[in-house]
Amino acid sequence: MPAFDEMHENGRVRAPYAGIARYLEAAGGQELEAKRREAEVLFRRIGVTFAVYTEGGDPERLIPFDVIPRIIGRGEWEGLRRGLEQRVRALNAFLADVYGPRRILDAGLVPADLVLKNEGYRAIMEGFTPPGGVYTVISGIDLVRTGPDEFFVLEDNCRVPSGVSYMLENREAMMRLLPNLCAAHRIAPVSHYPEELLETLKSLAPPACSGEPTVVVLTPGPFNSAYYEHSFLADEMGVELVEGADLFVRDETVFMRTTAGPRRVDVIYRRVDDEFLDPLAFREDSTLGVPGLMTAYLAGRVTLANAPGAGIADDKAIYPFVPEMIRFYLSEEPILRNVPTYMCERDEDRDYVLAHLGELVVKLARGSGGYGMLVGPHSTAEERAVFDARIRERPADYIAQPTLALSTVPTLCAGGMAPRHVDLRPFVLFGREQVRMVPGGLTRVALREGSLVVNSSQGGGTKDTWVLEQDPPPMSQSMGPGTMTQSLGGMTQTLGAMDPIPRKPR
C-alpha cells in the first residue's frame, strides 16, 4: 500500500521541506550520523529516559531521537488546531453529560452499556461538576496522515496523556545540535508549554481557593515509566513534585507536608491512574494515592486534573461515536475524521473482522502502548489464530480498523536515510475560559522498516515537529535529470543540487 511522502510530491520537494532538503543535500551521511551520536550523548547526559519493565535487564532507556525534523505548514496546522479544539470540547461535553443528565444516552446515540458498564466509568462522579466544568484539562490526540489534506484521529487520550516532555526536549536538542538550520526557518515555538499548562491549571482552582493557587504534580514515584516527565514538568512549572505520602487530607482539605509545616494544595496535576488515587474511594491496597482525596475533591476543596472518570471518553469502544458527539453537543460537522472502526461485540462486525484478520489492525478496546495489537498485513498465521480465539472468547474487548497507509518522513536509520511511518500527538489544554495548544506536538516514528507501530515501548522513536509560522514559497528545483539521486522506497533524496544552509564555523 503506497504511503504519502510528506517531503516529496510529484517529483518535487514540498514547500515546507525546502530548507530541510537543502540541508540534507549539503550535510551528507557522515555529518548526519555525527549529529545522531551527539543527540544520544545529550539525551543521556540530561537523563531523558523512559522505562519498560516487561523485558528484564535495566528498564531505563533512551527513546531514539531522529535529527531530521518533521515539518508541518502553517495552513496545515491551522486546520488541525480547529479540529483538535472542536474534538476536545465535544469529549468534555460528553463527560459532563454522562455524569449528569445523560441526554446522549437517552437519545440512543451512544449505547448506555458501553458507558455505564465501562471499567473507566466512575459512579462516584455522578452529579458532580469539576471546577469550570472541565474534565479533560490535558488531552493528547493521536493523529495520522494519509495524504496532502487527509488527517485522521487514531485515538483520544483523556486520562493521563504522556509524551509532552519529549516534545519539549526534542526542540531543545535541535536548537543545540542544528542552530543554523533552526534559524533558517520561522518555527512556531513550543517552549512556553509549561507556562500555558500552569496557567490552565491555575484557572481551574476550586471555589474554596482564595489568593494564588498552590499547584502540585502528583507522581506514582521514580519507578513509573514516565517519571522523568513528571519531574521535568514540575521543574519547568516551578511547582512541587509530590508522591501520595507527601499529601494528607484534613477537614476535607488537602495539605502538603513541608519543612515549614503543612501547606494547603489547591490544584493537583495527577499522573496517577484513577484506581490508585484514593484507597478510601477506589483500590484499598493502593499506597500511591491519598486517603480522603476524593472526599476533598467532591467537597470542592481541591481540583484534580484530569478529572477521575475521564477515561471513558478515550475508550476505544467509545471512539466511533465521537463524530456524533460533535454533532450532538456542538451542532457542527466534525473537522477531523475518525478511522472506520469495527466493534467486535457486534455480530456483523465480528464476522467481518474474523474473515479479514489479515487486512485489519485489531486492538484491545482498553489497551495502550501498542500492546495487545495485531497488525494484520504484517502478522503470521499463528498470530492471527491467537487473535481469532481471543475475539471469539471476549468480543467486547476488541475493535478493528482498516490498515491505513501512514505517511512517511525522511529518517536517519542504520543503513542511511530512509522513509519511516509517523504519527502525531498534539497536546490540548482546556482551561476555565479558553483552549490552548502549542503548535505541533510529539511526532513518533516507527524505526523498523515497514512497521506501523510507533510506540516507544515497541521500538519507536521521536522527532522534533516544526510548525512553520510562514509557509515558504514553492521550490522551483525539479528532481529530474542532472542531479544525482538515490531512490529510497518512494522517497527520493537529491544530492548536491542546491545551495547549502550556512553553518556555524567549527
Image (cartoon, rainbow, N blue to C red):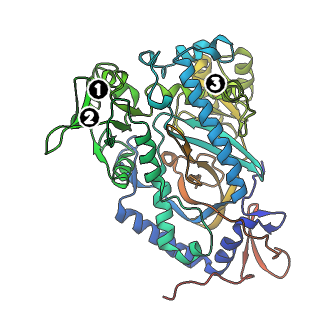
Residue 457 locus on image (x, y percent)? 48, 46
- Residue 374 showing in the rendered view: no
Element type at marker 3? helix
Q: Residue at x 50, y 49 (%)?
A: 456
The residue that label 3 is drawn on is: 388
How crowded pointer 1 is (Cα within 10 Å; few <14, some 14-19, many 20+) is rated as some
Is label 2 in a helix, a strand or a loop?
helix
Quickly name the residue at label 2. 244
- The residue identified by callout 1 is 286
Which of these two is toward me, 216 or 156? 216
Label 3 amino acid?
Asp
**Residue 503 shows in this picture:** yes
Residue 244, percent from left and from top = 26, 34
Q: CA distance from mark 3 to mark 2?
A: 42 Å
User: Front-most of 352 and 15?
Assistant: 15
Tag 2 and tag 1, C-beta contact below 8 Å = yes
